[in-house]
Amino acid sequence: MSRVGGKNSWALLLLILAGVVLGGFIGYLAKDVPYLSWLNYGQEFGIGSGNTGGTVSLNLGVVIINFGIRIKITIAGIIGLVLGIIVYRKL
């Protein structure tokens, strides 16, 4: 990634990732608080079927490798993403 307008694109990626992770963590902590439970509202999806996101298996005879990914997008995660972008613009 190259520098855009004198700013580092890696810094943007890092701030967005940190915002999503922190927002998701705050949403998880707020899920049991009655007036903040809306922060944990979101959608979950992934590879495979079922609630857990499922896995894709690679059987090599001796070793079985399971691949899987599950993503949960919440309101708090989106707020964290936006805050990460705002912090990047202020830098």
Image (cartoon, grey):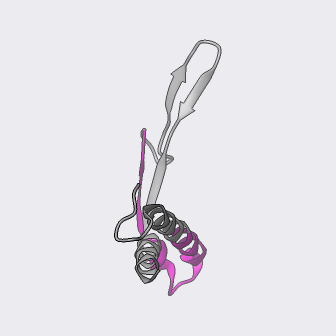
Total residue callouts: 0
Image spot of residue 37 (x, y percent): 50, 79
Residue located farthest toward the left when viewing the structure as drawn: 5
Image spot of residue 79 (x, y percent): 43, 77
Image spot of residue 21 (x, y percent): 54, 66
Image spot of residue 87 (x, y percent): 46, 80
Residue located farthest toward the top when viewing the structure as drawn: 61
Residue at 40% over, 79% down: 89
Residue 82 vertical placement versus 14 (above, below)? below
Residue 73 vertical placement versus 87 (above, below)? above
Residue located farthest toward the bottom when viewing the structure as drawn: 35
Residue located farthest toward the front when viewing the structure as drawn: 6
Q: Please say whether residue 39 is one of the residues in the magenta stretch.
A: yes
Magenta region: 22-47
Residue at 64% over, 19% down: 63
Residue 76 vertical placement versus 58 (above, below)? below
Question: In front here: 3 or 70?
Answer: 3
- Name the image quarter holding residue 62: top right
Residue at 55% over, 19% down: 59
Q: Please say whether residue 33 is one of the residues in the magenta stretch.
A: yes
Locate the N terminus by quadrant: bottom left
Question: In front here: 61 or 33?
Answer: 61
Question: In front here: 73 or 12?
Answer: 12
